[in-house]
Image (cartoon, helix red, strand yellow):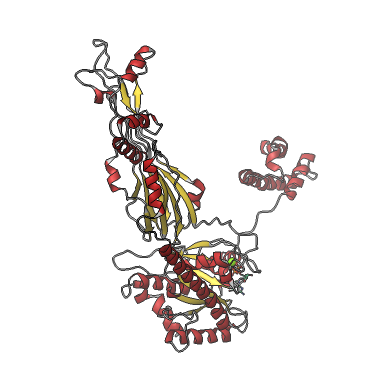
């Protein structure tokens, strides 16, 4: 009876649990459990009593208004829904392949001014600890990153500052190191730097070269180390003035031992392989000296210590030279995004209209993880098995894209940055051979344009070359003649970067994915396409790019019905074989065992 009472009162005691507009999933689950439980109880109570109470009627009404539990979807049906989703069922993709990043190495902690004191000695010797050195910044290319969006969002990366020294000769802790992880294929180029230690060294050299009167003026100029001293806080008034007037010559600026590992500027790194060990980008600055460093016979209890050095600051441009292992190239609406969903876990947008995809999306194809993924044995001997590769779904290409039509040059820039290319051709739309040829034409035109651009740039560089005695040199001389020399301590960095060097598109390995093979009359279209591709491979017909040295070692046309997830495993095995053969021809397991040759045999 107690249970019946509680069940009938529950909706009144906890209305929020029974509200039809409960938003939180937890409360929804709880209310669902309660409602099923109550439903059962209501049922038993109605069998006992002919007319339900008002509270039960209310509760009943609420239960009927409550949304029913969705039936469990069978797996194959769920997969079908994944490959043919509603247009609003997609994950937002933030893709950044270019960004600038400021890197600040940690500054050193300050030295400490302190003296030994205990019950017996009231005014003991100096015992101030040294400051800890600043944190270092490292960089490492890792395989499981696909974009630069995280770094682009941060903008500045700062390593930890060294902790200041303390009394009882306690040195400060070192600042925290930072390791920046970037995707494999990232090119890092320095565009500016501000190195306070180098600047100070330069300033001291310049001052030494000046005559004493000017040198005295120059010393007064403000700079990062214009006042390197930490004074004893107890010294005030006259004592402080006395202290300031009798300060010794400041110690020379110092660098940490690790800075020997730092690359000389301007730093330029092409991280095209996953790295086991990170590279040092910016070494942390040294901590300041505690007051025992300045103790002399004449002055056994110095009341000053030095500040830590300031950390180096570098400005970089990061660019992804390699977007993915495979780039999907095709006309708008060809089915590239559906194909990416079929081979990877990507949730890229799919829609039956052109330009559904506006930004590249990177999907990762996991090989052999026993969860319904393609079972492909891949890898180079001695390098461990390949566990995955990445595929870039690139926006659709239209005619005259090389003249910046459609999504134009932006799109082609992404094509250029894929390791291999998969030309996605819709078998149900027009002549597939012509489609393939027009896709190649655009790509080749873009390549020609780029080559021309690079030639023009190198030409202008040659023309801009100035010999000795040019106007630039004379400007420097003018500066040197000036009475009051300008000592710039933080010059504003400016540098114009050239486009990064990328291998020509036509030299990339490629294959054709013939999609929508489930549609009517697609078989004839596929046979035509296959005959053409075989002709290109054999050299019987010219390469569609029109380039002499274009890649045609092994070209496949793979029929696929991405919407039904059919034929996609062959894409995984073929791609793995291609990638293995690029890395070490002949030794690849995949070449020997699965897809690559296998697919060719099956098709050829
Ligand atoms: N019948 C059939 N339809 C497909 C297949 N693959 C894709 N489609 C359909 O083709 C339409 C376009 O597919 P998307 O994957 O969005 O094409 P896309 O190439 O990414 O298009 P853009 O992003 O605009 O360049 C969608 O309606 C898909 O359902 C297939 O294998 N068979
Ligand atoms: Mg798309």
Measuring from the top left, give residue 287's x and y in whole percent.
Answer: 32, 33
Image quarter for ligand 1: bottom right
Measuring from the top left, give residue 350's x and y in whole percent.
Answer: 61, 65
Of all residues, the one furthest to the bottom in this rendering is 540
Q: Nearer the viewer, residue 270 or 226?
A: 226
Q: Quadrant of the C terminus?
A: bottom left
Measuring from the top left, give residue 458's x and y in whole percent.
Answer: 42, 66
Q: Nearer the viewer, residue 35 or 409?
A: 409
Left or right, 334 with respect to 462, comes to: right
The count of marks equals 0
Q: Nearer the viewer, residue 23 or 314?
A: 314
**Rendered residue at 65%/63% (across/down):** 87
Q: In this view of the protein, can residue 76 be seen by the observer?
A: no
Q: Quadrant of the N terminus?
A: top right
Q: Quadrant of residue 168?
A: top left
Of all residues, the one furthest to the left in this rendering is 297
**Rendered residue at 53%/86% (across/down):** 527
**Rendered residue at 39%/59% (across/down):** 466
Q: In this view of the protein, can residue 428 be seen by the observer?
A: yes
Left or right, 497 with respect to 9, comes to: left
User: Relative to 245, does residue 16 appear above or below in the rendering?
Assistant: below
User: Relative to 310, does residue 346 appear above or below in the rendering?
Assistant: below
Q: Quadrant of residue 214?
A: top left
User: Relative to 171, does residue 327 appear above or below in the rendering?
Assistant: below
Left or right, 66 with respect to 223, comes to: right
User: Relative to 150, does residue 291 appear above or below in the rendering?
Assistant: above
């Amino acid at each position: 009876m107690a249970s019946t009472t509680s069940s009938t009162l529950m909706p009144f005691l906890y209305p929020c649990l029974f509200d039809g507009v409960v938003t939180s999933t937890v409360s929804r689950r709880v209310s669902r459990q309660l409602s099923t439980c109550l439903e059962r109880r209501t049922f038993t109570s109605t069998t006992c009593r002919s007319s339900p109470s008002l509270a039960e009627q209310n509760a009943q009404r609420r239960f009927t208004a409550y949304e029913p539990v969705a039936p469990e979807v069978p797996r194959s049906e769920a997969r079908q829904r994944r490959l043919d989703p509603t247009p609003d069922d997609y994950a937002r993709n933030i893709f950044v392949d270019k960004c600038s990043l400021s890197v600040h190495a940690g500054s050193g902690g300050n030295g400490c001014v302190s003296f030994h004191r205990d019950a017996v000695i009231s005014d003991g010797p100096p015992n101030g600890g040294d400051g800890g050195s600043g944190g270092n910044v490292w960089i490492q290319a890792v395989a499981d990153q696909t974009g630069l969006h995280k770094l682009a969002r941060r903008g500045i990366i700062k390593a930890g500052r060294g902790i200041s020294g303390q009394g009882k000769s306690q040195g400060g802790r070192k600042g925290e190191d930072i390791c920046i992880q970037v995707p494999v294929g990232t090119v890092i180029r320095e565009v500016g730097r501000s190195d306070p230690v180098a600047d100070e060294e330069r300033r001291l050299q310049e001052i030494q070269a000046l005559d004493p009167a000017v040198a005295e003026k120059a010393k007064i100029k403000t700079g990062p180390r214009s006042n390197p001293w930490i004074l004893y806080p107890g010294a005030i008034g006259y004592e402080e003035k006395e202290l300031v007037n009798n300060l010794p010559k400041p110690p020379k600026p110092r660098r940490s031992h690790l800075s020997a590992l730092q690359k000389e500027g301007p730093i330029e790194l092409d991280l095209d392989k996953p790295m086991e060990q990170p590279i040092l980008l910016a070494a942390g600055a040294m901590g300041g000296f505690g007051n025992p460093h300045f103790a002399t016979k004449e002055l056994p209890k110095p009341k000053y210590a030095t500040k830590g050095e300031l950390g180096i600051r570098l400005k970089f441009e990061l660019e992804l030279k390699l977007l993915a292992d495979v780039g999907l190239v095709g006309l708008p609406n060809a089915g590239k995004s559906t194909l990416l969903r079929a081979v990877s876990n990507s949730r890229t947008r799919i829609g039956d209209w052109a330009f559904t995809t506006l930004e590249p999306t990177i999907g990762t194809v996991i090989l052999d993880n026993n969860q319904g993924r393609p079972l492909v044995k891949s890898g180079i001997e001695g390098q461990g098995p390949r566990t995955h590769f990445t595929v870039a779904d690139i926006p659709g290409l239209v005619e005259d894209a090389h003249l910046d039509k459609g999504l134009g040059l932006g799109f082609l820039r992404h094509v250029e940055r894929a390791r291999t290319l998969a030309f996605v051709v819709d078998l149900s739309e027009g002549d597939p051979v012509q489609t393939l040829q027009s896709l190649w034409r655009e790509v080749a035109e873009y390549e020609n344009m780029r080559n021309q651009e690079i030639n023009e740039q190198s030409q202008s560089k040659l023309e801009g070359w100035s010999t000795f005695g040019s106007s630039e040199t004379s400007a420097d001389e003018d500066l040197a003649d000036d009475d009051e020399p300008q000592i710039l301590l933080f010059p504003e960095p400016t540098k114009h970067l050239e486009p990064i060097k990328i291998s020509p598109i036509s030299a990339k390995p490629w294959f054709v994915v013939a999609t929508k093979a489930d549609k009517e009359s697609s078989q004839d279209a596929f046979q035509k396409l296959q005959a053409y591709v075989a002709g290109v491979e054999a050299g019987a017909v010219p390469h569609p790019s029109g380039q002499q040295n274009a890649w045609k070692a092994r070209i496949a046309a793979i029929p696929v019905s991405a919407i039904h997830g059919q034929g996609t495993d062959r894409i995984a095995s073929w791609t793995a074989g291609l990638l293995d053969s690029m890395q070490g021809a002949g030794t690849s397991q995949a070449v020997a065992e699965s897809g690559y040759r296998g697919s060719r045999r099956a098709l050829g």
